Image (spheres, rainbow, N blue to C red):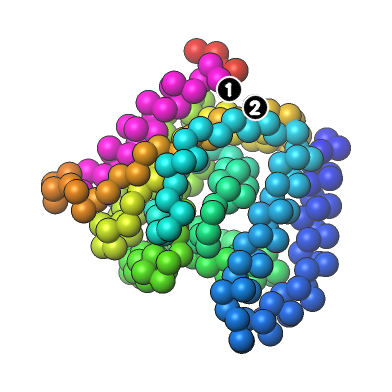
Amino acid sequence: MLRFILVCIIVLLFLILTIPVLAIEWIIGKFRPMARDISSLRIVQGVFKLILWVSGTRVTVIGQEHVPKDTPVLYIANHRSYFDILLTYCRCPGLTGYVAKKEMLRYPLLRTWMKRLYCLFLDRKDIRQGLQTILTAVDYIRQGISICIFPEGTRSVNESELDMLPFHEGSFKIATKTGCPIIPISLSNTQEIFEAHLPKIRPAHVVLEYGEPIYPADMSRQEQKQLGAMTQNLIRETLMKNRSIAGQTE
């Protein structure tokens, strides 16, 4: 329980103590928007790394060389834990916005930081608004900002992490409309940090593997329509491969 309390304290202190930082960065952004954006990225990455350290999370990273550093990408990952966001964001080489549920807009300061980091807020019940979110993500990619999305739409609570929810094909329009590479991310054993024993946070060994880039421009139109199922299969195969590394049993 101590780890949970410490993580809560870190989050609260960050949100409160960085209010002046947000003001300073707002001023900087008037003259040097890129400097402001990189500053926000590195600050939040640092806090996320601290939280992972406090939580006792040990991470094995595979395939990070597959992530291009000279072009924006669409990250696609399976989703089992709130910690998935921390694990992936602290390793983004450049500006990256996440697609989050609109309910996150309820939280002051947190929503301010999320907007500063180019996060998008999706109303899963409003098809028209969902389309606008995708179009905004397309615009971000064209500005050089990567996007990360969990295409299951929510955290999977199925007993096995191999039993994922269907990937929403609409998420992949971000890549097909821009031609940016898709980077599959397989997250193994992340539920053991928190969700498997709420409200306790316990040390866990997780495996994060980046797959080889997928280029929609090299695919036929029919293949592009099945990108969701194809990417999900790649992630599932990687999860199966990494079970022993994460110390999971069959």
Question: Residue 165: percent from the left, percent from the top?
Answer: 40, 38
Q: Residue furthest top?
A: 250
- Magenta segment boundaries in residue numbering: 224-246
Type of the residue with mark 1 = Ala
Q: Is residue 64 left or right of residue 132?
A: right
Q: As rendered, which of 53 and 159 lies closer to the eye?
A: 53
Question: Residue 107: percent from the left, percent from the top?
Answer: 67, 65
* Residue for point 55% across, 13% down: 249
Q: Is residue 131 left or right of residue 85?
A: left
* Residue for point 56% across, 34% down: 61
Question: Residue 22: percent from the left, percent from the top?
Answer: 72, 75
Determine which residue is flagged by label 2.
205
Type of the residue with mark 2 = His
Which quarter of the figure has residue 152? top left
Majority secondary structure of magenta residues: helix
Asked if residue 139 is among those painted magenta in the image, a careful observer would answer no
Q: Relative to 247, is 2 above or below? A: below
Contact, CB < 8 Å: mark 2 with mark 1?
A: yes
Any part of residue 39 in sight = yes
Q: Relative to 59, is 125 above or below? A: below
Any part of residue 152 in sight = no
The span from disc 2 to disc 1 (Cα, nearest Å) is 6 Å
Determine which residue is flagged by label 1.
246
The quadrant in which the N terminus is found is top right
Asked if residue 234 is among those painted magenta in the image, a careful observer would answer yes
Figure disc tally = 2
Helix, strand or loop at mark 2: strand
Q: Is residue 130 left or right of residue 95?
A: left
Question: Residue 96: percent from the left, percent from the top?
Answer: 51, 60
